[in-house]
Amino acid sequence: MSVLVDTSVWIAYFRGAGNVAAVDALIDQNLLATNDLLLAELIPYLHIRRQSRLIRLMQTIARFPLTIEWAEIIAMQILCLRHGINKVGLPDLIVAQNAIQNGLALFTLDRHFRLMSKYMPLSLH
């Protein structure tokens, strides 16, 4: 199963923190996945740090198209709120929706995704 790597994991990885070995293993196994939203969050960060080679590498990762179903996003947010999962932003709901739609596991450091996975079919890595 391919793994959608969240921005939180990439930033920790670029800093040499977090679970570097787990990201390296995904790279070695060619299981990385991304989408345009995650790239839009990461590429400016890399551009400012003049990491053009890394930007090119990030753009070679398997990219899954975003098909935003707004009614589903609203339903996900209602579900979160009903279960006390507050302050989940639209970008994170879109990332969760993208992972679910494409049968991807999500690798994240953000706690609210763990909470969300208890109430929706979000698979975590």
Image: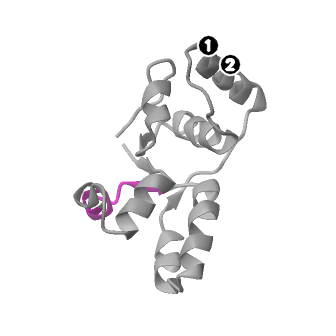
Q: Write the residue at 32% across / 63% down.
A: 27
Q: Is residue 81 magenta?
A: no
17 and 23: which is toward the camera? 17
Which one is in front, 78 or 121? 78
Q: Is residue 38 left or right of residue 62?
A: right
- From which residue to which does the magenta span run? 24-33
- What crowding class fits label 2: few (fewer than 14 Cα within 10 Å), some (14-19), or many (20 or more)? some
Q: Secondary structure at mark 1?
A: helix
User: Residue 74: x and y, percent?
Assistant: 73, 25
Residue 100, compared with residue 10, is above or below; it is: above
Q: Tell me if mark 1 has few (under 14), some (14-19) or many (20+) residues whose alpha carbon lies within 10 angstroms of its own.
A: few
* Residue at image location 52% in from the left, 77% down from the top: 55
Residue 66 vertical placement versus 97 (above, below): below
In the rendered image, residue 36, in percent from the top left (x then y), is placed at 63, 58
Residue 21 on image: x %, y % = 22, 59
The answer to whether 76 is drawn above or below residue 50 in the figure is above
Q: Which mark is residue 60?
A: none
Amino acid type at circle 2 is: Ile
How many angstroms separate mark 2 from mark 1 (CA)?
6 Å
Residue drawn at 58 percent across, 56 percent down: 38
Q: Amino acid at mark 1?
A: Arg
Mark 2 near mark 1, Cβ–Cβ under 8 Å? yes
Residue beneath disc 2: 78
- In the rendered image, residue 67, in percent from the top left (x then y), is placed at 70, 42
Image height check: is 110 above or below 45?
above
Q: Quadrant of residue 31?
A: bottom left
- Element marked by disc 2: helix
Q: Residue furthest right?
A: 70
The number of numbered badges drawn on the structure is: 2
Q: Which residue is mark 1?
A: 82
